[in-house]
Amino acid sequence: METKGYTQDGTVDLRGRPVLASKTGKWKACAFLVGYEAFERMAFYGIASNLVNYLTTQLHEDTVSSVRNVNNWSGSVWITPIIGAYIADTYLGRFWTFTVSSLIYVVGMILLTTTVSMKSLRPTCTDGICNKASTLQIVFFYTSLYTIAIGAGGTKPNISTFGADQFDDFNPQEKELKVSFFNWWMFSSFLGALVATLALVYIQENLGWGLGYGIPTVGLLFSLFVFYLGTPIYRHKVKKTKSPARDLIQVPITAFRNRKLQLPNHPCQLHEHEPQQYINSGKRQVHYTPIF
């Protein structure tokens, strides 16, 4: 495979065909992913950092209820990725899980922007006395929020790992590039959060909530469009096991069974497969370290 210019880690294209290392992956593919991460973080923190303020000033919830509702939503955003990761590893793969989830995410952002922009979907105030939000207004608003949480479940655990798939660990140069990718990944993530905290919060409170949520929504739509343009050059990992959950459970079981075995004095005496088997299977060897 290497002599023909194919990747050595067994990655394929969207149709399951081996891919050429020179024409796929690496930074030419990851640039799309880094851009998406910046806009996604901008959207998330644009909501989360000012959500209590919106609930108390626009939906007229009391402070305790609004804080509780924000915590419930934030918890959902961080719990759903467990489900999204399982679906990706067991059924759909990272690309298709991300594709479906990102569309759900954008739908949630569009619904949320619509909710905060339309007067009919917000309580009205007369002579300084504000009505409580109606059942319809509450349902529409929280449906938007939890649609975003569902979409985040499939995007958060898969987009960064899909980026890592674009680098061949069996190629020393690409392995070094992967480290650079994660550095830029974190930079774009914090940059999006910074812009949301400094700029979007100000826009929401001074220029309008619709504009404050509309900007990251448009950014997400644009970044997804760019992401899909890069589809022909993406690399995809081939699923090697039917149930990753079963493999995960086997680890502590095997460790418990081997708890009384004597550790060899030299790493070369540890049981390992032949290097060629890792290449053929597409699995990565976990190298020995003094700590682990």
Image (cartoon, grey):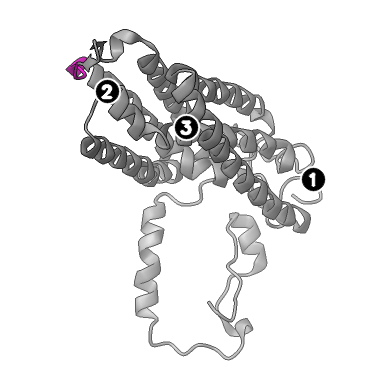
Which structural element holds mark 2?
loop
User: In this figure, which residue is indicated by the disc labeled 2?
Assistant: 59
- Image quarter of residue 185: top right
Earlier sequence position, callout 3 versus callout 1: 1
Mark with earlier residue (1, 2): 1
Specify whether residue 96 is in view.
no
Please state which of the two labelled residues, at mark 1 or mark 2, is closer to the viewer.
2
Label 1 and label 2: CA atoms lie apart by: 59 Å
Answer few, some or many: residues within 10 Å of disc 1's Cα (few below 14, many 20 plus, some between 14 and 19): few
The residue type indicated by label 1 comes to: Gly
Viewer-side label of 3, 1: 3
Nearer-the-camera pick, 248 or 37: 37
Q: Residues within 10 Å of mark 3 (few under 14, many from 20)?
A: many
Mark 2 vs mark 3: in front: 2
Looking at the rendered structure, the kind of residue marked 2 is Leu
Query: Gap in Å between the C-alphas at discs 2 and 3?
Result: 18 Å
Which of the labelled discs sits on residue 5, or is there none? 1
The residue lying at 46 percent from left, 24 percent from top is 204
- Point out the stretch of residues depicted in magenta: 131-136
Residue 46: mark: 3
278 to 193, vertically: above or below: below
Which residue occupies 24% across, 21% down?
A: 139
Which comes sooner in the sequence, label 2 or label 3? 3
